[in-house]
Image (cartoon, rainbow, N blue to C red):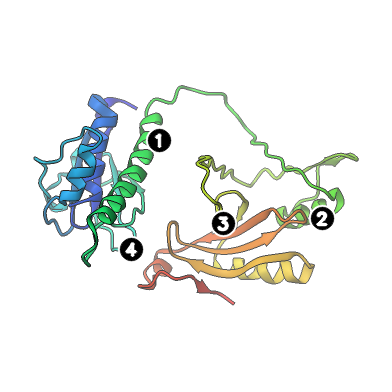
Amino acid sequence: MQTDDRSFLFLCVANSARSQMAEGLARMIFGDRARVQSAGSEPSTVNPYAIEVLRELGVDLSSHRSKSVETIDPATVTTVVTLCAEEVCPAFLGGARRLHWPIQDPASKEPLPRDEMLQRFRTARDQIRARLEVLRALMDVPEGPSGHEFHASVRVTDLAASARFYAWLLGAQPKEWTHRYVTFVREPLRTNFVLLVADGKELHRDTLYHLGIAVADKAAVVRAYEQARAAGFAVAKAPRTTWRGTPLHELWLEDPDKNLVEVYARLTDEELSERPASLEPTALV
């Protein structure tokens, strides 16, 4: 990627907290390797707490001003990053690459103690900073091997039971097996490989420590649920639509060793437009 291609625009609604912190942090992290801007659909003023928690890292936002997204020339932007979580994200015209980082708004409409507000802003700041550090690391990825296969393996206690489950899940018979392992090869499946930071935090049942397989749509998720029940496989969580983070239609199964397996489908634009205000999961069966 050439320097001229590194022009980032960070967007939230008011351009007062998240996008302002992202702009300031990006300038610190990227240095002269990128051009950085921020804006909002309903610009207001830079939040004093954003200024304070960025000052803790040596970043000065005191001269920043909130700007309207309408003042940004699309020709000057190659990547747009939206940081809205529960709000409607600002629209931006142009052919820029789009990234969505749903960060909860640290500002509060209700009065809160100063210490609590600072903690909310520090949490948002640190989440944005970590994402920016990944973005910076990806700017200069050298040429790598021309891979044509990705391999992953899990340990199991009952080889035969697990062979049956994954033959069903993958829709393929094993390529080979011995008394110690079973190998599946399913070339049409694309890889979705997740790296999760080991931060010592408690993990819940539906964290990133799981296996997953994508299907076509909501009906296919429900159909997989019916098929799993008919086959006698364990269902950890019935089909539902989740709205926080990446909206998905999802079903959670357990393999014979109780490893979680997510069967999911991404939402269409029409389905996304029906997002409930509460963002609570919607049952599909």
Q: Are marks 4 and 3 in contact (CB under 8 Å)?
A: no
Q: Nearer the viewer, mark 2 or mark 3?
A: 3
* Of the image marks 4 and 1, the number of the one nearer the N terminus: 4
Q: Which mark is residue 86?
A: 4
Where does the image place residue 71, in percent across and percent down from the top left?
Answer: 11, 49
- Which element is circle 1 on? helix
Q: Identify the element where label 2 is drawn.
A: helix
Q: Kindly identify which residue carries mark 1.
A: 134
Which residue: 43% across, 57% down? 245
Q: Whole-percent x and y of residue 170?
A: 71, 53
Contact flag, marks 3 and 1 (Cβ < 8 Å): no
State the quadrant of the N terminus.
top left
Instruction: Report the residue at 63% width, 47% height from top.
Output: 189
Judging by the rendered image, the residue that carries numbered circle 3 is 204
* x, y percent for residue 208: 55, 50
Mark 3 or 1, closer to the camera:
3
Q: Nearer the viewer, residue 90 or 12?
A: 12
Q: Which numbered disc flags the more N-terminal residue, 3 or 1? A: 1
Q: Amino acid at mark 1?
A: Val
Q: CA distance from mark 3 to mark 1?
A: 24 Å
Where is 238 relative to 83, above or below? below
Tell me where residue 3 appears, x and y as whole percent.
27, 26
Q: Earlier in the sequence, mark 4 or mark 2?
A: 4
Mark 2: amino acid: Arg
Q: How far apart, in angstroms, are the residues tagged by discs 4 and 3?
A: 22 Å
Which sits earlier in the primary sequence, circle 2 or circle 3? 2
The alpha-carbon separation of the residues under discs 4 and 1 comes to 24 Å
Q: CA distance from mark 1 to mark 2?
A: 38 Å
**Circle 4 — which element?**
loop
As measured in the structure, the alpha-carbon distance from the residue carrying label 2 to the one carrying label 3 is: 27 Å
